Amino acid sequence: MDRLDAVQGLLFGAAVGDALGVPAEFAPREALKKNPVTDFTGGGVHNQPPGTFSDDASLLFCLAEALIQGFDTGIMGKNFVKWMGEGYWAAAGTVFDIGGATLRAIRAIAQGVEPELAGGAGENDNGNGSLMRIAPLVFYSYNKPARERFDAARKVSSLTHRHIRSVIACFYYLEFMSRAFEGKALKDIYADLKTSLPLALTPLIDPAELAAFDRLLKDDIASLPETAIQSGGYAVHTLEAALWCVLTTAGYKDAVLKAVNLGGDADTAGCVAGALAGLYYGYPAIPRAWVQGILKRDEIAGLGRRLYKAFFHKP
Ligand SMILES: [Mg+2]
C-alpha cells in the first residue's frame, strides 16, 4: 500500500464516517433498520448540511496539525482550544457538538492547566472522546518501542481523557492500526493482539485494568451478533463496535455504513471505524462521491500531504 494513500485514507476515512453518522447521532437502532443511512444526508438532531463532519474529525485534524510540528501536547492543547473558541478545523467554521468531558478539559487547558493533566481521571470519565480523535498518532508511534508507543497514547489521550481505561482503549486501537498500516490482514492482527497486547502492557500497567477489554482479548468479537454490540458513548463499547464492523465487512463502505447504522453515538462509531478502514483499504477505496461531498475536502487533502511529508518524506 502506498503510504500517502494510507495517510489520506485515514483522514478522509474518519471524516466521511463521522459525516455519515452525524444525522444519525442518537437515533435508535430500530429506526435505522427501517430507514438506514446509505449516503450523506442533512437533518437529524444537529440539522447540518450533507457532508458535515463533527467534533470527532475536527479534533482528529487538530491532532494531525500538531503532530506535523513534532510531538508536543502544548501545541495539541492550543489547537483544541482554537477549535472550541474559533471553530478551527470545524467543518463549516462553527462547533455544533462537543462531549462533556472534552468541554471541561479544553476549558481547563484554556485556563492554563497542563494539557497532559487536563482530562478527567475518574472511572466515569471513560467516554469515547479521546479514542475518536487519536488515530493520526499511529504515524508518529508505529515504528517506536512499545513503552514509547504507550506513553504517546497516554499523553495524547490525557488531554481530555486521563483514566487508564481510555488510555488502553486508545493504545489497543493504535496497535491495531499500526499493524494495518504494515499491511497485515485484519483477522491476523486481531488474533495477534490477543497475546501481544497484554504482553506489551503487563510491565506498564496494573494488568487488572485489562479486564474491561475481555470481550476483545478473550472472546471473538467478530462472531458476536449485532445485538451484543453496544454503540453508546463508552470508550470500550465504541472500540468494540468499530472493530466488529471492520472485522465483519470486506471494504471501507460496508464497514462505515455498518458502524453508523448501529445508531446511538453513530458519528463516533463511524469516525473510529472509518479511520481504521480508510487506513487499511486506502484512500482510493473510499467512494468518490463521499470524498467529493465532504466539507473542507481540499483542506483535508492538504493536511494529508503535509502529514505524509512530515513523517515519511523527510529530506
Ligand atoms: Mg461528533
Image (cartoon, rainbow, N blue to C red):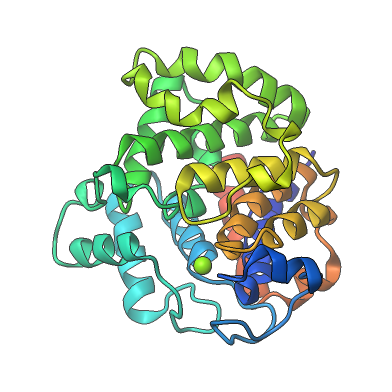
* Residue 162 falls in image quadrant: top left
295 sits left or right of 134 in the view: right
Please state the horizontal and vertical placement of residue 139, each as a whole percent of the image.
55, 40
Please state the horizontal and vertical placement of residue 85, each as a whole percent of the image.
31, 78
Q: Is residue 76 above or below residue 166?
A: below
* Front one among 65 and 53: 53
**How many labels, in total?**
0
Quadrant containing the C terminus in the rendered view: top right
Quadrant containing the N terminus in the rendered view: top right
Q: Is residue 48 above or below residue 314?
A: below
* Residue 71 falls in image quadrant: top left
The residue drawn where x is 79% and y is 74% is 35
296 sits left or right of 88 in the view: right
232 sits left or right of 258 in the view: left
* Front one among 263 and 192: 263
Q: Is residue 180 above or below residue 90?
A: above
The residue drawn where x is 64% and y is 77% is 23
* Front one among 169 and 14: 169
The residue drawn where x is 49% and y is 76% is 90
User: Is residue 97 in view?
Assistant: yes
The residue drawn where x is 62% and y is 78% is 52
Please state the horizontal and vertical placement of residue 245, each as a whole percent of the image.
72, 46
12 sits left or right of 137 in the view: right
User: Is residue 314 in view?
Assistant: no
